[in-house]
Image (cartoon, helix red, strand yellow):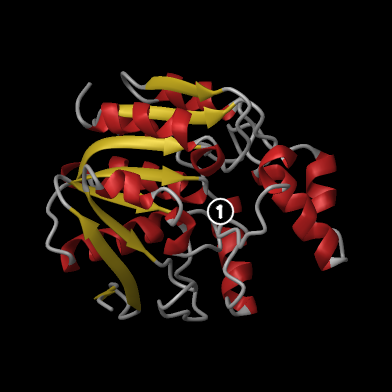
Amino acid sequence: MPHAQAADGAALHYDVIGSGAPLLLLAGQSNHHRWWDTVRDRFAAHFTTVVMDWRGTGESDAPDTDTYSTPNFARDAVAVLDAAGVDRAHVYGTSMGGRVAQWLAADHLARVDRLVLGCTSPGAPHGAERGPAVRRALADPDPDAARAALLDLMYTPAYTVTRPGPFHTLGDPAMPPHARRRHLRASARHDAWDALPRIAAPTLVVHGTDDDFNPTANAPLLTGRIPGARLFLVPGGRHAYFEEFADEATPPVIAFLDGS
């Protein structure tokens, strides 16, 4: 499978399927490209989709160096676009991928056509943080309990009760511990508040109304900070709204990317 080379020499795995205008899909923290598995075909029917494994995940290198930050992840994404021969792409980033997409659109303006920011945040200093009960549940020393808490934050019980998994939004189980720690730190340190007004790409902000993992209050904050941004809320959606509520969320995103 193809790899791009980052500025520090790290190999970054990526994959391309579909036809039409390029669309870069960016996954969440500590996850690889399979985050998009259940919905990628829907996008590939309209666009040439490009997905990547963040450094530290999947088939990308995992250097134990101070190169894990949302601005640097954006530079990694540019390296992937370069390797794929894509000068300019639509970008759809969710969760930490949405944080990275903010830097991609603000710092690499010529590379981003249209921008979709899903279930994401401008960063801790100005964003709405998850509540203490959520933080405690995710930090449970019992790994099974912590996983169950994460699953509940991602999906409604009505969804998971009929599906045995696997769920590709729960993190890359093969990540080395140092990469997992560095991903967590990179996302926690994200602060793009001052950069958001620089975004020139037409922007759609999407969020589930029942997202406690990354509180829904972040959506209007982003919308108000990015010039001309639009807001679309998915009723009942939790953090993985794009998967569970694909029938409701995907068509408006495709219509927006198509210029509607």
Amino acid type, callout 1: Ser
Count neighbours of disc 1 (C-alpha within 10 A) and say few if under 14, some if 14 to 19, many if 20 or more: many
23 to 130, vertically: above or below: below
**x and y percent of residue 18 in the render?**
21, 54
Decide which of 105, 53 is in the foreground and name it.
Answer: 53
Residue 77 horizontal side relative to residue 180, left or right: left
Decide which of 125, 75 is in the foreground and name it.
Answer: 75
Q: Mark 1: which secondary structure?
A: helix
- Residue 193 in view in this figure: no
Residue 180 horizontal side relative to residue 138, left or right: left
**x and y percent of residue 174 in the render?**
58, 78
Decide which of 165, 6 is in the foreground and name it.
Answer: 165
- Residue 31 in view in this figure: yes
- Residue drawn at the location 36% of the way across and 51% of the way down: 40
59 to 29, vertically: above or below: below
**x and y percent of residue 161 in the render?**
73, 47
144 to 149, vertically: above or below: below
- Residue drawn at the location 35% of the way across and 55% of the way down: 74
- Residue drawn at the location 52% of the way across and 81% of the way down: 64
- Locate the N terminus and report the quarter of the image it occupies: bottom left
Q: Which of the 4 image quarters holds residue 155?
A: top right
Q: How many discs appear?
A: 1
Q: Which residue is mark 1?
A: 187
**x and y percent of residue 106 in the render?**
30, 40
44 to 192, vertically: above or below: below
